[in-house]
Image: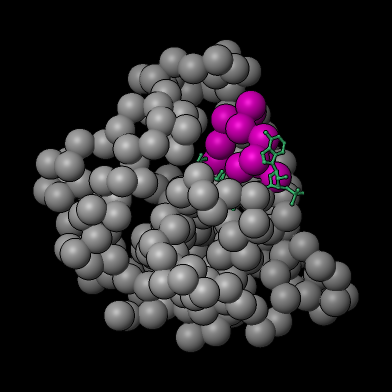
Amino acid sequence: MQVFLETRRLVLRRFTMADVDNLVSLDADPDVMHFVTGGMPTARDEIENELLPGFLDYYEQFEGYGFWAAIEKATGEFLGWFHFRPREEAGPDEAELGYRLRKSAWGKGYATEGSRALISKGFTDFGVQRVVAETMVVHEASRRVMEKAGLTLVRTFHQPWPYPIEGDELGDVEYALDRADWERRQQAGRAGAGTPGEARG
Ligand SMILES: CC(C)(COP(=O)(O)OP(=O)(O)OC[C@H]1O[C@@H](n2cnc3c(N)ncnc32)[C@H](O)[C@@H]1OP(=O)(O)O)[C@@H](O)C(=O)NCCC(=O)NCCS
């Protein structure tokens, strides 16, 4: 197992081709996929031949960036994943944060815990200058995770999306956190953007 980092309750490790079943079952839950595809599952074939090879390519292309499988330390179970990757339309020092967890793992603070650790490691070890995340206006849980991880609302925008769901007429939101602000908060010892020692490994 190639561990990228550990938090108090999670291990974030590299994906391998042995994770096909984990991803198939994660994306088979319509509730997990509601804000992603309107609830449609991802086909096994797509996971095996496109998504997972794409995840593995990231490890070759970028240091410190990628899709990380989230494992619950207490049980060893696969919970889902986080991504922390270069933002397409920006330079390599701007990272895009994302997450997808099994329903059984929701509401326990895991998305916040993993996000804070990735942000901390990105700013501390990999020269990241800005972390950005996007979601739908109506995706309250995801917005709350962004806020708890220290990101603040930058803008609301509208983009075409192929899977219409209720609330998408309200558009999307972009949240962001700059390294200087994160450092200031770390120094001030305030909670909200990760705590020292949270990201290990
Ligand atoms: C979004 C997601 C990652 C959140 O994971 P999680 O581990 O439950 O998140 P956390 O427990 O760290 O925090 C969730 C916060 O949202 C709040 N929340 C959850 N549902 C909510 C809702 N419907 N309205 C308002 N707040 C809500 C929780 O109360 C919690 O905030 P709190 O700690 O202040 O009480 C998870 O729901 C998920 O994987 N969803 C499916 C995939 C997805 O939509 N990914 C994001 C795409 S942008």
- Between 47 and 105, which is closer to the camera in this rendering? 105
- Between 51 and 184, which is closer to the camera in this rendering? 51
**Extreme residue in the front direction:** 75
Quadrant placement of the N terminus: bottom left
Residue 28 x/y as whole percent: 32, 37
Identify the magenta region.
134-144
Q: Is residue 79 left or right of residue 40?
A: right
Residue placed at 49% from the left, 17% from the top?
165
163 versus 35 height, above or below:
above
Which quadrant holds residue 83? bottom left
Q: Quadrant of ligand 1?
A: top right
Which quadrant holds residue 59? bottom left
Q: Is residue 89 left or right of residue 170?
A: left
Residue placed at 61% from the left, 42% from the top?
142
Residue 124 x/y as whole percent: 59, 79
Residue placed at 50% from the left, 58% from the top?
95
Residue placed at 64% from the left, 50% from the top?
107
Which quadrant holds residue 156? top right
Does 82 lie within the magenta span? no
